[in-house]
């Protein structure tokens, strides 16, 4: 069974009516009118609640105000009520094919989809390619003559430069 709920603020000011002299009588009449009005629409009164509400006070601060509300409920109508099958997907549709087949009753589905071996059949070493040195953009490497300077290789050291010069 599904319900829908309606929360309305509790009346804060009493309605006037002939013959009602005390404040308590007028307040009771106001609540009675509110409850009867919503009952005519199919709402069933559940309870009254006092709940906190954070509200701004000035530019930067907040205060807690306590609000009184009335809680009503009624059976959800067919137009607003969703079917249980719409809320949850079927196990076969949401599961993996192997799991779905098992749910539907095929015992060998998990065995057929399982890998034969976790380790590779042949022990082949992985090929490792050397990392390429990143080159700066051409506009950063040009000299005043318009020719790019020679870029030293990563294998070449400063000592090698000194030996090559006479």
Image (tube, rainbow, N blue to C red):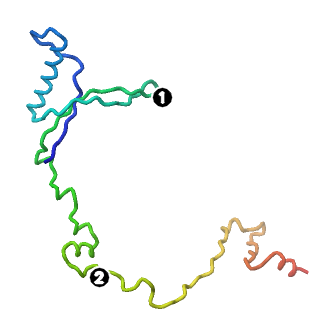
- Reading the image, the residue beneath label 1 is 60
Label 2 neighbourhood size at 10 Å, few (<14), some (14-19), many (20+)? few
> Of tags 1 and 2, which is closer to the observer?
2
Query: Residue at (45%, 85%) from the top-left corner?
Result: 119
Query: Residue at (16%, 52%) from the top-left corner?
Result: 82
Query: Residue at (19%, 39%) from the top-left corner?
Result: 5
Q: Quadrant of the C terminus?
A: bottom right
**SS of the residue under disc 1:** loop
Say which quarter of the image contains residue 97.
bottom left
In the rendered image, residue 101, in percent from the top left (x then y), is placed at 22, 75
Position of 114 with respect to 135 (left or right) is left
| In the rendered image, the vertical position of residue 137 relative to residue 75, given as above or below | below
For marks 1 and 2 on the same chain, the one whose residue lies earlier in the sequence: 1
Marking on residue 111? 2
In the rendered image, residue 40, in percent from the top left (x then y), is placed at 8, 31
| In the rendered image, the vertical position of residue 112 relative to residue 34, given as above or below | below
How far is the residue under mark 1 from the one under mark 2? 64 Å
Q: Are marks 1 and 2 in contact (CB under 8 Å)?
A: no
In the rendered image, residue 108, in percent from the top left (x then y), is placed at 24, 82
């Amino acid at each position: 069974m599904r319900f829908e709920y309606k929360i309305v603020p509790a009346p804060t000011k009493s309605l006037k009516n002939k013959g009602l002299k005390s404040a308590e009588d007028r307040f009771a009449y106001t609540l009675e009118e509110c409850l009867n009005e919503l009952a005519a629409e199919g709402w069933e009164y559940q309870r009254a609640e006092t709940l906190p509400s954070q509200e701004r006070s000035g530019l930067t601060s907040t205060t807690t105000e306590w609000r009184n509300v009335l809680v009503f409920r009624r059976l959800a109508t067919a137009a607003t009520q969703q079917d249980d099958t719409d809320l949850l997907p079927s196990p076969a549709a949401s599961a993996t094919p192997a799991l779905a087949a098992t749910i539907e009753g095929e015992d060998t589905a998990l065995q057929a989809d399982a890998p034969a071996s976790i380790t590779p059949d042949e022990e082949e070493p992985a090929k490792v390619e050397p990392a390429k040195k990143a080159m700066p953009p051409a506009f950063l490497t040009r000299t005043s003559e318009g020719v790019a300077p020679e870029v030293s290789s990563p294998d070449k050291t400063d000592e090698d430069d000194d030996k090559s010069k006479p």
